[in-house]
Each structure stands twice: as structure tokens, then as C-alpha cells.
Image (cartoon, grey):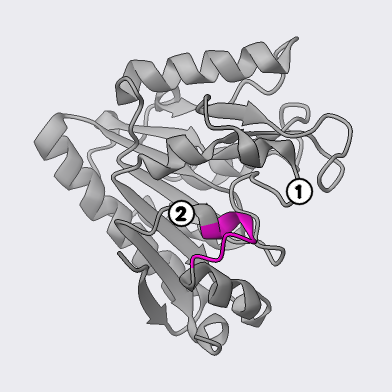
Amino acid sequence: MALTIEVLENDDAVAKAAAGKIAAAAREAVAARGVFTLAVSGGKTPWAMLRDLASEEVPWSQVHVFQIDERIAPEGDPDRNLTHLHESLLGNAPIPKENIHAMPVNAVDPVEGAKEYETTLRGLCGNPPTLDMAHLGLGPDGHTASLVPNDPVLQVVDRDVALTDPVNLYQNRRRMTLTYPMINRSRQILWLATGAAKIPMLVKLRAADSSVPGGKISQQNSLLLTDKAAAAGL
């Protein structure tokens, strides 16, 4: 099944549309199963999306938010996705704080931290854990989540949470990330990609080009929200 694509005017419109999609999915999941499980990535447009989500009709007490990936950095560090997740969502929406599940990147042993996060996912998303929705972004090098080019993490298929290479750091940070199997089991995958710099990688994403990490994500039940600038090459 090919990737579904919706083109909007600009990144603000993309953020607002994404918030509406998430809210609708949350209402549907809670009606069907009593819970909505969402994993989110970082980035400027996603933080705007989460702020917009705060004004949508959402059954917040039954929503659980996970992280797609996180940098191994101190708590409160501006590099941490969690720092911005708290600012954008907790600061604006009535979601219980305990419903936001942070990746334990500051565990004494990050490998054990990854296993701990798998346990958290199984507790709320079943076994094997299946997210209602995974939100993804697309880097100019084709990475998504922290599934980054030429890293051994790309080959991990026997775990749902894994770590990037501790030696060859990507952008100066080691990272914890959901793996392909975990992301690809999601009931829905929501891509956000905006700006002309994304044109080459959007072409590869639409073609499911496995030479870039994003191209290996399942396109079944996947929706890309993009703006006119990024869609110019499609």
C-alpha cells in the first residue's frame, strides 16, 4: 500500500492538521479500546502540533504518550526531546503527568534502560506492544526516529527499543530509539515533513527507497502531512 500524502499551505497548517488527526485517532481508540497510545518525535513543527493538540477535544486521562527517540543528555537539557514535550504538551493540555512516559536515558546502564522502556510499552500497548499512532519526522539525511544512516541500530529486529553506536556518535549524542519492528506494528503512522530542504528525501520516502532509513518504514496505514515547499518535488 502506497504512502498517503496530504499537502498543506505551510508548516503551521501542517501542525494544525496533524493535531486534528491525532485528536480524532484518540477519540476513536478510546471508544474502541479504552486507551490511546501515541509515540512522538522531536522537532519545531511537532512541538507546534502538540500545542495545537491541547485545544482539541481529546480524552486526556486515557491518553498515554511515549517517545519515539531521545538523546542521552541530562534532564532539562535543551537537546532532550522530553524538555520540549513538557513545554508543548504538559504546559498546555490537561494530560496527567504520569501519562507521559519518558525514555530512561539517564539509567546507570542505558541497555537496561532500553529494556525497562520495552517493559513499559508492553504494560500499556500489549505483547508485542502495538502503538495506536507513531509520529515520525524525516531528516535531510533520510533518518527517522534515531534510526540514523550507517548505524548498527538499523539492523536491530529482535528488540523494540535500542541504542545507537556508543562510539560513532550521531550529532554528538548517543540515542535511544524505537526500532523498525516497534514502529511498523503501529496502527497508524503519521509523518510530518516541511520545507524545501526535505524535497530529496521525500522523493525517496514516497518511493520506499531502502537506501535511506525512512524508506524502510512500513507505508501501510501511513499518512504524510507536508507543505507546498517540501511537496514541490513530488
Up/down of 3 relative to 133, above or below: below
Element class at badge 1: loop
Up/down of 161 relative to 131, above or below: above
Residue type of the residue flagged with mark 2: Arg
Residue indicated by mark 1: 150
Task: Tell me the number on the disc at residue 51.
Answer: 2
Image side of residue 23 versus residue 144, left or right: left
Is 197 included in the stretch rendered in magenta?
no
Residue type of the residue flagged with mark 1: Asn
CA neighbours of label 2 inside 10 A, class few (<14), some (14 to 19), many (20+) = many
Image side of residue 76 versus residue 67, left or right: right
Task: Estimate the spatial distance between the alpha carbons at disc 1 and disc 2, rounded to whole Å.
Answer: 34 Å
The x, y position of residue 76, in whole percent, is 72, 32
Is 209 included in the stretch rendered in magenta?
yes
Q: Residue at x 48, y 53 (%)?
A: 217
The x, y position of residue 86, in whole percent, is 55, 38
Q: Quadrant of residue 167?
A: top right
- Sequence-earlier tag: 1 or 2: 2
Count of numbered circles on the image = 2
Give the magenta-colored segment's residue range: 208-215
